[in-house]
Amino acid sequence: MSNDTVRLTQSVKGAGCAAKIAPGILDKALCGLDLPVDPNLLVGLERADDAAVYRVSDDLALVQTVDFFPPMVDDPFSFGQIAAANALSDIYAMGGVPKTAMNIVAFPASTMDISILRTIIEGGLSKMREAGVVLVGGHTVEDSELKYGLSVTGYIHPDRILTKRSLQCSDRLILTKPLGTGIVATAIKAGLADQALTNRVTQAMATLNRDAALIMNDFSVHACTDITGFGFLGHLAEMVVDSGFGVRISASEVPMFPEALEWAAMGLIPAGAYNNRSFRGAFVYFATSVPQRVQDLLFDPQTSGGLLIAVAAGEAERLVAALIAGGIDCAAIVGEVIAKPIDRIVVE
Amino acid sequence: MMKELDCRGMNCPAPVLHVRDTLAKEVSIDIAVLVDNEAARQNVSRFLEHQSYQVQTEPQEGGFRVVGTRGEGAYVPPAASPTQEVIRPGTGKKIMVLVTSGHMGHGDDALGDMLMFNFIKTLKEMGSDLWCVAFVNSGVSFTSKGSEAVPLLQELVENGVQILACGACLAYFHILDKMQVGEVTNMLDIVTGMKRADSVITV
């Protein structure tokens, strides 16, 4: 099998972050586990944040994350880039700076040419280089389905950690990448997406969240997360639940790939979107004016999605302007933190 | 003629593509699709609705049977006649009905249950004046799995009536996941709806 003709997406069942295990099921595995306690563990498993933070000294903490998944695009180099950008994103979402990474690989060596793996890792390396990250090792296992990702370690100042759970009333919410990659990946798998769109979506997924993270550092950002497998509303729900506030989202302001809307109406929706909806749907009230296909996109599992940033209301317009000036074209204010309904998301 | 397709054991997006390819070859047929998971059920339903089919789902051993019908005169595809609307007798008013309880009136609740069900069944006689039916408090049970009103409300939806169910009420009775017809709504929508309606009938 040659490197040029193989279609990676045909070799696997799930695609990208859409392959993430359903959140409700994961909760059953993790809930009530006896976790070791350590005063230096500033952000751990029980908080379910983007990455873990461990304090080394008063002015230095390690921030760690791991992410890997099956391919959502056919091109091996692009897959490597996207998987790396996706793994690095968790560090940026915490406000950290990634430093070292290790490859995680599951590869069907008996059925797939090993040169494909080389190309995937080259793609990953190109993103690590761009991020100023050193590849220090890795681990590869034989598996019937291809998977690739990174374990990443970075630095962060213990006083400047950006978690998901520190919304303040009247904060504005800003999203930095368009939604719809899960649905587009399904369309790619179905052979319905043309090359131009595939390139556009691939580029969005392969874009590091580094620039957005650097830009937001100059503003009064209160909370941040990155949008991946649980979808926009799933990750937003993690910010909102137990926050004591509610959130109002203006569906028409949320950046989306227009083609994904059409495919959503056609029923090319990954199972992950339905899982996300059944897990978090109870926290979301949709106005009747929000079409079904838009609701589907808001729950669509994203691969290497954008940052969702909660910033002080007075600085929101300036932050969006700075993001756009920094090349993050689709950055937009998509909603605001409101007093009521508490712990709920209203989509209008 | 009803075409049967077995899409069990297929992963997303294969069932939708299978249905699409079948319809591309044989136009204007009714179709029944067997699927074995919830995502496939919803995706196939969305696809068929998008293709102007009327869709009904029946649970079946190990999954669902999604039936798409294109009965003569049952539905006018919007693409074929963009300006044409289904004409129903009416005076052009917008009536909103607010159902606040599982039963109608006070006295005997068993009688009240029967009356309310009968009321919902008869609502369609309002014709095209009936614009919206909103369910609050224990009234939301009519939109949920197990209620005999579900197919009646489904029929209203097909005739362009908005069916709304209060999200907080569904959550309160722990039946949010069991809602089968209409859309989840909030008090703001209900109040806005009352303002837009020409008249509001509360039962």
Image (cartoon, coloured by chain):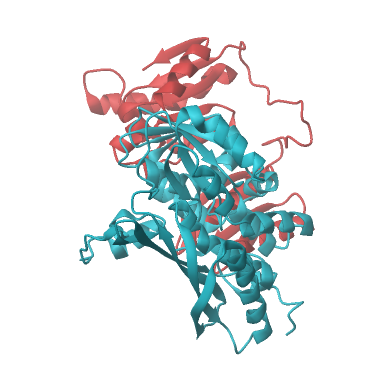
- Rendered location of residue A67, percent (x, y): 48, 66
Number of numbered discs visible in the structure rendering: 0
A55 vs A162, nearest the viewer: A55
B125 left or right of A258? left
Name chain B's colour.
red
Q: Which residue is drawn at 57% across and 32% down?
A: A318
Q: Quick one: which chain is cyan?
A: A
B167 vs A239, nearest the viewer: A239
Q: Residue furthest bottom?
A: A110
A187 is higher (above) or lower (below) than A69: above
The image quarter containing residue A114 is bottom right
Q: Which residue is drawn at 58% across and 11% down?
A: B93
- Rendered location of residue A169, percent (x, y): 37, 30
The image quarter containing residue B136 is top left
- Rendered location of residue A333, percent (x, y): 55, 34
- The quarter in which the N terminus of chain A is drawn is bottom right
- Rendered location of residue B173, percent (x, y): 29, 37
* Residue B14 in sight here: yes
